[in-house]
Amino acid sequence: MGWLFKTEPSQYSLDDLARDGRAVWDGVTNPLALKNLRQARKGDPVLIYHTGDERKAVGLARIVKEPYPDPKRGSEKLVVVDIEFAQPLGRPVALDEMKKNPRLKGFDLLRLGRLSIVPVSDDHWQEIMKMAGRKTEP
């Protein structure tokens, strides 16, 4: 299983992650998104998804440090993970394309559109990689 992490590209984009190489993924406050983030494990693949005007999956990353309390917030309830850049998707996959694909039925991105961290099942992951012109995860 992998994860989809949403980001507003004007705040922090895939290009920023590529430049930095590694980043603390923070700012998650929604209880369900935090529950999802707490389940993330070192080595899990991550789809980076640009929100706002773009609304598309644009790249790949990997979790390199498991969830830990957000050092900026001082609360055990608010967690972060460290991720590292893997690569851009060969071809970004737009939300509209995903909505039209019957193989992505039940995908939390499509069901719970405002959630910033969603799990991606192996089947959904492979379908998105296929849509992006890729065969496998990073």
Image (cartoon, rainbow, N blue to C red):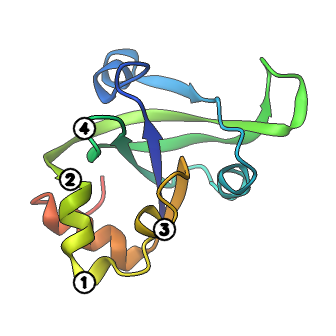
State the CA–CA distance, disc 2 to disc 3. Answer: 15 Å
Q: Say which residue label 1 marks.
A: 102
Label placed on residue 94: 2
Mark earlier in primary sequence (3, 4): 4
**53 on left or right of 51:** left
State the CA–CA distance, disc 3 to disc 1. Answer: 14 Å
Element at label 4: loop
**65 on left or right of 134:** right
Query: Crowdedness of circle 2 by 10 Å Cα count: few (<14), some, many (20+)?
Result: some
Q: Label 4 near label 3: C-beta < 8 Å?
A: no
Question: Residue at (63%, 54%) from the top-left corner?
Answer: 40
Q: Say which residue label 4 marks.
A: 54
Q: Label 1 near label 2: C-beta < 8 Å?
A: no
Question: Residue at (45%, 42%) from the top-left corner?
Answer: 6
**124 on left or right of 43:** left
Amino acid at dot 1: Pro
Amino acid at dot 3: Asp
Label placed on residue 108: 3
